[in-house]
């Protein structure tokens, strides 16, 4: 009888209190782990964006070495060289792209050429007659998602197009259409004249997907922007 009683005690299930304690422990662990996991995922996206921006800049330099010109449409080349933009002969694809340059809305003008897509600025392979693919970028899985979409727009890990500025007058410096106007731009490595000593600049709106020309370069919505020319 004593043996049977001991067996029945060992075989009984969890009590309600024990189950509640286990659930509470799981909830506490989840509360600790989930924010940490989210932080790690966020850091991974930032790391990916930096890698992709470096890849874009390298591809543009490789194209320039191959063709002795930068990947841009004839229209953009004309805009940069004919004095239509007195502020700078350089050109920014995305951000505040000049509205009087027809069809140039984002980085597709560059990416169609680098990816040798037979469309838009590279229709008929006119800007990449060697048909060289200069960049290995993954295609997006849906409209507005990370990667390169069917129109050639290269989007960051948060689904926003990368902004690209190219040194169209070959003076070894770039003046980005957004960053050359911001207050406190020296905090992010931009000179008082609004220039960065580099032939190509690439930047992302960052995790919040926003930027504001009326906010200092390293504050507010601009604080999490990811810039190719500084490791802030």
Image: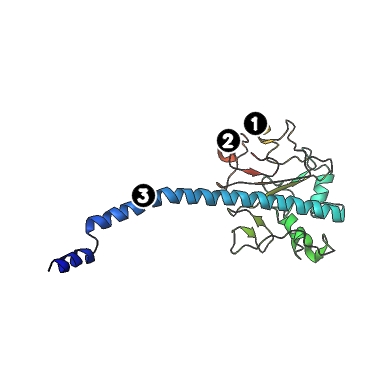
Compute the Cα span from label 2 to label 1.
9 Å
Secondary structure, mark 2, is loop
Name the residue rendered at 74%, 58% in the picture.
Answer: 135
Q: Is 151 above or below relative to 80?
A: below
Task: Tell me what residue is drawn at x 82 percent, y 50 percent.
Answer: 77
How many residues crowd around disc 2 within 10 Å: few (fewer than 14), some, or many (20 or more)? Answer: some
The N terminus, quarter of image: bottom left
Q: Which residue is mark 3?
A: 28
- Cα separation, mark 2 vs mark 3, equals 34 Å
Precedes in sequence: disc 1 or disc 3: 3
How far apart are labels 1 and 3 at the CA level? Answer: 43 Å
Say if mark 2 contacts mark 1, CB within 8 Å. yes
Classify mark 1: residues with Cα within 10 Å, few (<14), some (14-19) or many (20+): some
Q: Nearer the viewer, residue 132 or 42?
A: 42
The residue that disc 1 covers is 184
Q: Residue at x 67, y 33 (%)?
A: 185
Counting from the top left corner in percent of width and height, residue 96 is at 68, 45
Front of the two marks 1 and 3: 3
What is the number of the mark on residue 20? none
Residue 93 visible within the image: no
For residue 31, say whether it is visible: yes
- Quadrant placement of the C terminus: top right
């Amino acid at each position: 009888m004593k043996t049977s009683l001991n067996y029945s005690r060992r075989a009984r299930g969890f009590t309600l209190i024990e189950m509640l304690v286990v659930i509470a422990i799981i909830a506490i662990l989840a509360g600790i782990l989930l924010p940490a996991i989210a932080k790690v995922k966020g850091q991974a996206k930032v790391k990916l964006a930096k890698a992709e921006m470096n890849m874009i800049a390298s591809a543009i330099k490789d194209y320039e070495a191959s063709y002795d010109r930068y990947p841009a449409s004839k229209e953009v080349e004309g805009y940069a060289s004919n004095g239509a933009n007195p502020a700078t002969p350089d050109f920014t694809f995305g951000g505040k792209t000049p509205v009087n340059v027809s069809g140039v809305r984002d980085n597709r003008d560059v990416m169609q050429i680098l990816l040798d897509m037979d469309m838009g600025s590279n229709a008929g392979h006119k800007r990449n007659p060697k048909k060289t693919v200069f960049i290995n970028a993954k295609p997006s899985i849906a409209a507005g998602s990370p990667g390169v979409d069917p129109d050639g727009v290269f989007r960051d890990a948060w689904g926003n197009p990368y902004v690209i500025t190219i040194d169209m007058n070959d003076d070894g410096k770039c003046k980005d259409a957004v960053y050359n106007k911001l207050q406190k731009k020296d905090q992010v490595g931009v000179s008082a004249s609004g220039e960065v000593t580099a032939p190509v600049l690439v930047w992302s709106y960052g995790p919040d997907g926003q930027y504001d020309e009326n906010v200092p370069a390293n504050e507010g919505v601009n604080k999490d922007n990811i810039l190719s020319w500084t490791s802030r």
